Amino acid sequence: MEYTQLGRTGLKVSRIVLGTMNFGPQTEETDSHSIMDAALDAGINFFDTANVYGWGENKGRTEEIIGSWFAKGGGRREKTVLATKVYGNMAAEGEPWPNSDKLSAVNIRRAVDASLKRLGTDYIDLYQFHHVDRSTPWDEIWQAIDVLVQQGKIVYAGSSNHAGWHIAQANEAAARRGSYGLVSEQCLYNLAERRAEMEVIPAAQGYGVGIIPWSPLHGGLLGGALRKEREGGGARSTSGRSADALKNATVRDQIQRYEDLLAKHGIEPGEAALAWLLTRPGVTGPIVGPRTAEQLASAVRASELKLGEEVLAELDEIFPGPGPSPEAFAW
């Protein structure tokens, strides 16, 4: 496993990030523990979660599963760079209550303590803002974060789903306060969705913020969706935002060209999609969310895959990026 530094920090993290969103809803606790053990054995030290994972009535369940894994000892916590998130509403289902979500200083304080309890640890390495809070000023957010850093409850702060100008605004506000600011940004970024290249990634690079792409297979679209469809495995080939993508003839043709290219070179589509992200400027490492040990093994193989210049050029032809702004939309 290769390692890199997280943004401008000195923290070394694996180039593959273990996403845990399926732990609980899709993968039972015992199997989740086995996947985390296998990840450490493969050299993956960067684990990502969120306070709302588990969803619905089980919000927080994923953090609890990670906490029970840490409790097994064996240096599990010490070997893991732990990232979680705050923003989502943690009030009980059907019982909405003010200040149970977003990024007010009150909610940040309450949310971090609740996450620490579920995770069974006394500190979080990377505490991420799961979404932009348009109603809370950055000075308030950084005041809350500075207190948590001073208390030893968190080490670094990062963002998720922020625009380029949000990253700039956040880090300029932090600089005025003498705070360290954002060190990472989790964004939707993959071969089929490259809009982050216009402004998010350039802003992140300018501020020393590491990019952590989520949905690297675009909901399964880049993981051999057409092949699985032919083989009768289409039920799990796409999900979420990509569920209806293959109904579009243009997208279907694009994915067929993609799969044909990789078949010609003997490369698995999902592994190629991950390997491509590892070639992109500013990318720390993509988040993979395995439901099984084999899916994790495939991600590890992707981290070792080196795509040739010919393949990279052809991938750019199939999935052309928008280019940076303002050239992407102006002369």
Image (tube, rainbow, N blue to C red):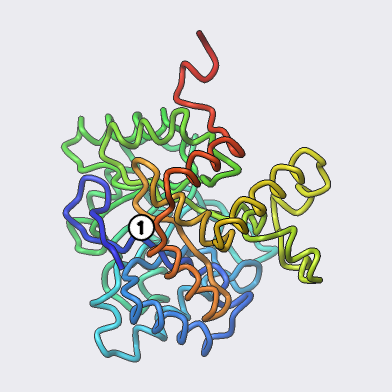
Percent position (x, y) of residue 41?
34, 82
Percent position (x, y) of residue 89?
56, 57
Residue sitting at 34 percent across and 78 percent down? 40
Q: How many marks?
A: 1
Residue 72 falls in image quadrant: bottom left
Q: Quadrant of the N terminus?
A: bottom left
Residue found at the far top of this picture = 331
Nearer to the camera, 323 or 105: 323
Asked if 299 appears above or below 213 in the picture, the reply is: below
Nearer to the camera, 248 or 26: 248
Nearer to the camera, 244 or 177: 244
Residue sitting at 44 percent across and 25 percent down? 324
* In the displayed structure image, the side of residue 227 where residue 57 appears, left or right: left
* In the displayed structure image, the side of residue 275 where residue 260 appears, left or right: right
Q: Amino acid at mark 1?
A: Arg
10 Å neighbourhood of mark 1: few (<14), some, or many (≥20)?
A: some
Residue sitting at 20 percent across and 63 percent down? 152
Residue under numbered circle 1: 109
Percent position (x, y) of residue 28?
58, 85
Residue found at the far front of this picture = 264
Percent position (x, y) of residue 291?
58, 75
Residue 309 falls in image quadrant: top left
Residue sitting at 30 percent across and 49 percent down? 144
Asked if 250 appears above or below 65 in the picture, the reply is: above
Label 1 secondary element: helix
Residue 10 falls in image quadrant: bottom left
Nearer to the camera, 155 or 95: 155
Asked if 261 appears above or below 299 in the picture, the reply is: above
